Amino acid sequence: MNQQIPSQSSSFDSYKPSQNTSASPLERSNDQILGLLLTKRYVEAKIEIESHPSERSSKNSGNECNGNPVSAGKIAAFPCAGRHGDLLLHILCGSGLENNSFIQEDGVTGVASNEIDKKSGHCDSKESQLREERKMHDLFLILIRAYPDATRTRGNNGALPLHNAVKKGLSKVFIETLIRTFPQSLDVTDADRLTPRDYNHPDPETRTFIDRPASCWLRQLIDEESHNDAESYIRHLEEIVNTLEKDIEESRVRIAVTIANQITLMEDKAKTLAECYNGKKDNDEKNDIQNDVIDQIKTLEIKLNVLRPKLDLVTEKLNIPNGVKTFHDDITMVYKTTISKSINEMKNDLQHLTQIAEKMNHTGC
């Protein structure tokens, strides 16, 4: 059964800055943001807490960022001075908008009936209410991201932030975020042995969120996480497939270009061989024969020059008779004539081959 419990506005409405001059940087930062929060200067509070590093960046950078040595997570986890264990999130949830405006999913602002001008029939401050709640919601999300465990931390009167949010009548987006962060908070009792369900909330739709069993929320969160994991895995596979398709296409292009270049090169070589193979072959053969003939001529001349002095020397030593000498001279002459004839024939062949080679050169091969 829902009970209307008087809100503890007195603990949130008054604020006196700490006069402790020996306070640590953490205490001073927390107290500064507390003052901005209680005076509903949500944008300034958001800027201030964002100027501090996150827990991860604080560790990576030696616990310093923009000149602020205290991380946002430590500020959000530090109990506010004189607030009986309340964290900044408890204070924010308990100092919500007094007009019970609420942000719908489509961005439209609903306003409680007691805020409607009875004479004009409409609410003049509707747009300003929406703007203020959005500012508050931005700060709300920053505090939860900085220190998610604040949603399960007991503050003043043993209350969780969800107790304060329901008592203050915060809109559905606040209530749902708190439940999703810590579904079991729906069943946690405060010092008065009351759960968040035991407090009245003015919005019927938000009331259904609060009355829903924590086990159903847990089941939904698990299903959503599995679904998100599956979608994330599918997107990962799609990225891999796209990358592979891109690599395959690039490989196809490279292979096609390489094959085309090789084919062109082979065609050029084949054309050159087809046009010049015979001429080149004949020219090579002509050069071989020419070199061989020249070598043979030189060899015969050398042998002839060597043989002549020896024959003359033998003739002189043996005093060969004139008949024998004449026979010797005849033999020598025949030998010389034969050699000269062979040399001339080889020279003629060489000249003929040279003429053939020159004709082939004129044809362009």
Image (cartoon, rainbow, N blue to C red):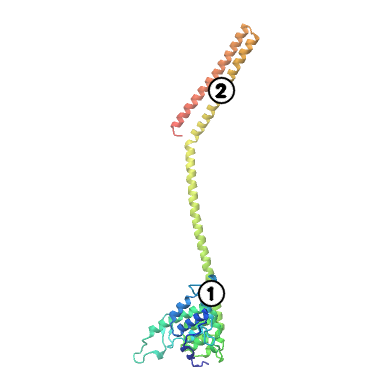
In the foreground, 305 or 62: 62
Per the model, the C-alpha gap separating discs 2 and 1 is 99 Å
Q: Position of residue 2 (x, y in %)?
A: 51, 92
Q: Position of residue 191 (x, y in %)?
A: 56, 90
Give the residue displayed 51% in from the left and 62% down from the top: 243
Q: Quadrant of residue 310?
A: top right
What secondary structure is found at the residue carrying circle 1? helix
Q: Residue furthest right?
A: 318
In the foreground, 320 or 219: 320
In the foreground, 85 or 327: 85
Is residue 171 visible in this depiction of the protein? no
Please determine whether, in this image, residue 293 is positioned above or below residue 233: above
What secondary structure is found at the residue carrying circle 2? helix
Please determine whether, in this image, residue 65 is positioned above or below residue 262: below
User: Would you name the residue on which mark 2 appears?
Assistant: 298
Q: Quadrant of residue 105?
A: bottom left
- Left or right of 43? Residue 323 is right
Q: Residue furthest front?
A: 21
Is residue 325 visible in this depiction of the protein? yes
Please determine whether, in this image, residue 74 is positioned above or below residue 252: below
Q: Residue furthest left?
A: 120
Q: Dot 2, how many residues are within 10 Å of its Cα: few (below 14), some (14-19), or many (20+)?
A: few
Query: Can you tell which mark lies on residue 153?
Result: none
Question: Closer to the N terminus: mark 2 or mark 1?
Answer: 1
User: Would you name the residue on which mark 1 appears?
Assistant: 55
Q: Name the amino acid type tagged 1.
A: Glu
Q: Position of residue 51 (x, y in %)?
A: 47, 75
Q: Name the amino acid type tagged 2.
A: Lys
Q: Position of residue 79 (x, y in %)?
A: 53, 83
